[in-house]
Every structure is written in structure tokens, then in C-alpha cells.
Image (cartoon, rainbow, N blue to C red):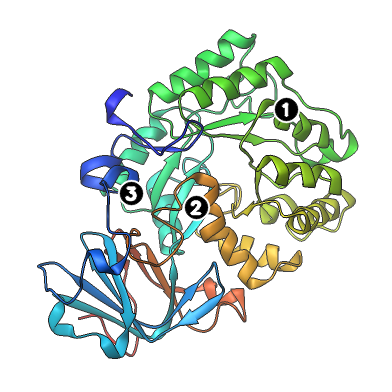
Amino acid sequence: MGNSQCALGKPAKVVISRTCCGALMALTACAGAGPRNSSVASPAEKRAGDVAVIAGRILDPRSGAYSGPSAIIIRQGRIVAVTADRAFSAATVDSVIDLRSLTVLPGLIDAHVHLAIGGTARANAKANVEAGFTTVVDLGSFTNRLLRVRDSINSGLIPGPRVLASGRWIGTKGGVCEFNGLGIAGGVDLFRQRVVENVSDGADLIKVCVSGWLAEAFQQPEKYEIADSVLAAVVSEAHRRGRKVIAHDLSAGGVRAALRAGVDGLAHSALLDERLATELRRRRMFMISTLASLTAGDTSEPKVALRQSLSTAQRAGVLLVFGTDGGVLAHGQNVQELLALKAAGLSSLDVIRMATVNAATALGIADSVGAIRPGMSADLIAVAGDPLVSTAALREVSWVMLRGQTLKRAVTRGAQR
């Protein structure tokens, strides 16, 4: 993509699409050096277009602490200050959004969706953002036309969340990601070529298919379907071009192969023992959950084992990331994954962290999303009730803001004005 794409730092970090720079200003790496603390952009000096969001309270997912009532000052799509409500003067901004009756959180992140599955991409994007997910990651599409849909969403032509996308799946012929001829029949060179083509078309990251589905991974734990040399080639080519690699990989043998190759993250929860989970933590490989779509409350042995494996990974300190496999799980029903994670024994705060700070860290975008502080993109949501007491409070997201633009308006005691 040449200079039209914005790398986020070191090789193997996610890069944002060609539309991110300029008009989008989606992330700090593309928007230039935004403010990093309230001292660099004082809210006391009124500027045209400044907006204040008055929150009844703000949840900091990293600490798990509430603050508030608070005023969040937004300028050109970014947060420039967070201050106590009592210290805020409406005379310093152009407009005020009054959410005193609500709890405000960072916009949520779903790190595993398929926007072209389960409806139109336009409808699916809208459903995700209205559910409170202001960033999603499309982990595999039938053609790279989805990358152009991503560009349209990111530029505001289509309503929806910030989208990162991997382009076409990369897997073996006849394998789990065959999908109407997408599988590759050949060796290292053809797999490298697919990586190059996806990146040239604008892919933000790479999705590779390593193992089969859960039943096979449970019954044949050492089985996986891609040659080690091919997997290593996919990863090295992607990293050379500054892209992270996320693998569909549920079997223990497949996970070990991914570790050897240097894969960055797993697209689904995988079947891990304590030793393998410890190795994931040591190698900083993250794991995306997708429990709701894989288990759906089933008590069969493989599905119980998968839920237990997620708990094993958490105890070992593996970076757990929220993902739904949207398209398999209905778009807009992302909260079902939150509830499945709670049922697997995670706390409400654990789950919220997975969908905010953990996901942002795993994707290499924690300098702009996943938290509410000066310098961050103004990606905010508001809910009634206390999401730390009950994750179900996130079932009804009352209000959504993305890059300083309100995409879903709240009907509250304090009206927007």
C-alpha cells in the first residue's frame, strides 16, 4: 500500500487501513501526535466545536474503579480533558451531552467478527456499533471486496464501528477455511503470495487457519492441517510487512505449531493444559474467546473442556481478548459472549477488560482506544446500572459515540442539548 497505509510502530503490529489518515484520524499513529495529558490542551479556553460529555460516573477498566460525576471534554474527535463535573463550566464548550444518569465506559472492542456473514455488511456494521462495539476486527472474508467496505465504514459513508480487517482467509485446500475454493493447494510460495496479495489490497492483519474445529481438536489433540514450513512462511511474510497474524487454532498440537512459528494470537479459545497456557503467557500470545458461538451452553465433553481451558489460560496470565465470531453468533448480539464468559467463571470486570484494554493491547492500538483519558479517541458508550455488578447491564447500551460523533442517542432524564 506504500505511503497510503499507517504502520503502528514495530513490525508485526496491526496497521490501519488506507482511509485512516487524514479524514478518519482513527488512531494516534495516523492522526499525528495528539494530546497525551490535560495540560497540553486546556479545556478552559473555548474552541469552536468542543463538546462536553457529562457522565454520572466513568469506569476505568484497567483499575476497575469508578470516578464521577465527570466532564469529558472532546475536541476534533479526541478527548482533551477529563475533569470533575463541579469544576466544569458549560461556557467553555459549544455543546453538552448530559448523561448524568448513566455510567460511561470506553467503547467496546470485538476482535473476531465476519461482517460479510449473517446479513449485509452494512446492516452488520450498524448492529455492532449500536450494541456498543466501536471497534471490530473482521477475521476473514470470501473476497477482498470487504476491505473496500471497511474503507467506506471507516470514512463514515456507511454507519458502523472502526474496522480492522484481514482480507481473505489463508488455509490449505480442503481445510477448515476452504470456503468455496479459498484453500491453497501448494507450498510456501503460494501461501506467501496470498499474504502479499492481502496486504497489497489493504489488509490490516492476517488470518491463518491451522487446526480443525473443536470436536476434532478434542478427539485428536496433536492434529493440525498446515505444514510447519508453510505456517512459518505465512508468519514471517506478514511480520516483514508489519502485520500481526491471528490463527484459527484449537488443538494443542496446532497451538504448539503456532508458538514455534511466532503467531501473535489465537482466533478462538484453544484446548490448553497448564504447561501450554504458561508458554502462551511467556511468548505473549493472546487468545480471543468466542465461547458463545463454540459452546452455546452445551455440556458435552469437548465444550466443557474448552470452557475449562479458558479458565486455565486466565490463571496462567494469558492475555484474554473478547471476540464473538460475529456472523456465526448474530451481529448485534455480542452481549451473548459477555454472558458466556461470566458463565465460564470470569468476573464482570475481567470480561470488560477483555473487550477494552486487553483487546486494545493485543491489537496494538492501546494508545488510542480502550480507555477514557486525554489523548484517546472519543470512543464512548453509556449504560444504565452497574456493569461491574451485572454484565447484563451491557445488554442495553443507551448511547454510543465514535471519534466524537454520536451514533446512538440516549433517551435519559438529562437530554442531549
Residue on which the image places disc 3:
28
Residue 182, visible in the rendered structure: no
> Dot 3: what SS?
helix
* Circle 3 crowding by C-alpha within 10 Å: few under 14, some 14–19, many from 20: many
Q: Residue furthest front?
A: 39
Residue on which the image places disc 2:
360
Residue at 51%, 45% in the rendered image? 363
- Image check: 112 left or right of 204? right
Task: Report the front residue among 346 and 86.
Answer: 86
Q: Earlier in the sequence, mark 3 or mark 2?
A: 3
- Image check: 318 left or right of 251? left
Residue 368 screen position, x and y as percent: 38, 54
Residue 166 screen position, x and y as percent: 49, 34
The kind of residue tagged 2 is: Ala
Q: CA distance from mark 2 to mark 1?
A: 24 Å
Quadrant containing the C terminus is bottom left
* Circle 1 crowding by C-alpha within 10 Å: few under 14, some 14–19, many from 20: few
Q: CA distance from mark 1 to mark 3?
A: 32 Å
Q: Quadrant of residue 343?
A: bottom right
Residue on which the image places disc 1:
260
